Amino acid sequence: MGVMTEHYFSANPSAPGPLRTITARLAGREVAVTTAGGVFSPGRLDLGTQVLLKALPEPPAGELLDLGCGWGPISLQAGLEARQAGTAVRIWALDVNERALELTARNARDLGLDAIRTVTAAEVPADIAFDAIWSNPPIRVGKEVLHGLLETWLPRLAPGGQAWLVVSKNLGADSLRVWIADMLGAGYTVAKHSSAKGFRVLVVTRSAD
């Protein structure tokens, strides 16, 4: 398995993992966070996630899934914004990578964000429907794995819920939008919300009925 796929799909990555502190702009302010090797983009807040974070609405009350949390930037922004707004949200930070989950949990503790819980897929209760799914999905792992992830989690949107995804235009954002619409079928809409810096933000909405 190469380093790129290790970022996403090794439960125990072999890349060196000394802790480092970086600064990231989350929820409108600069915060110090801890990262390490063996997770996605340990040296900085990656460009795709930056684009997504700028486009996202405020987190809704209820259940929010951060699909592929890495060291936690999406979960941390959701937690910071929810705390500032007084919104009651439970944030499920999901990853297969144990180091990513440890880093997200550490960063949540350091920022005093009790709403974030780090989980593997098996630890998410089967009866939970998500009011929001936010993700910079792992496009480079290949269509089969990516499609499997989206087929598993997007149908778990609650009625009226939305999934916000960021995808590189050069890595198939437009074709993925069509595939998601075909996969989900009636009762869902899939639209391009915006484009910036070579990325598209896609929004999947489940009808309220």
Image (cartoon, rainbow, N blue to C red):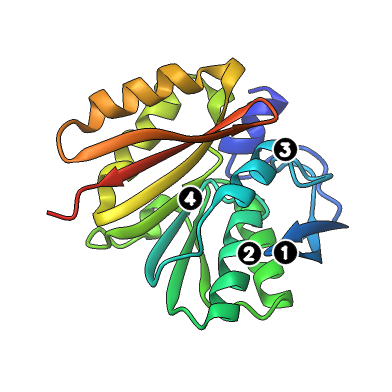
- Judging from the image, what secondary structure is the residue with disc 3 in? helix
- Judging from the image, what secondary structure is the residue with disc 2 in? helix
Q: Please tell me whether mark 2 or mark 1 is closer to you in this view.
A: 1
Q: Residue under circle 2?
A: 76
Q: Residue under circle 4?
A: 134
Nearest the viewer among 199 and 69 is 199
Q: Earlier in the sequence, mark 3 or mark 2?
A: 3
> Which quadrant holds residue 50?
top right
Q: Looking at the picture, does residue 157 appear above or below residue 113?
A: above
Q: Please tell me whether mark 1 or mark 4 is closer to you in this view.
A: 1
- Judging from the image, what secondary structure is the residue with disc 4 in? strand
Q: Earlier in the sequence, mark 3 or mark 4?
A: 3
Q: Please tell me whether mark 3 or mark 2 is closer to you in this view.
A: 3
Amino acid type, label 4: Trp
State the residue at coordinates (18%, 30%). Answer: 185
Q: CA distance from mark 1 to mark 3?
A: 16 Å
Q: Residue placed farthest to the front in the image?
A: 194
Amino acid type, label 2: Leu
Q: Position of residue 132 (x, y in %)?
A: 39, 56
Is there CB contact under 8 Å for labels 2 and 4?
Answer: no
Nearest the viewer among 121 and 131 is 131
The dot on residue 28 is 1
The dot on residue 47 is 3
Can residue 20 be spotted in the picture?
A: no
Amino acid type, label 3: Leu
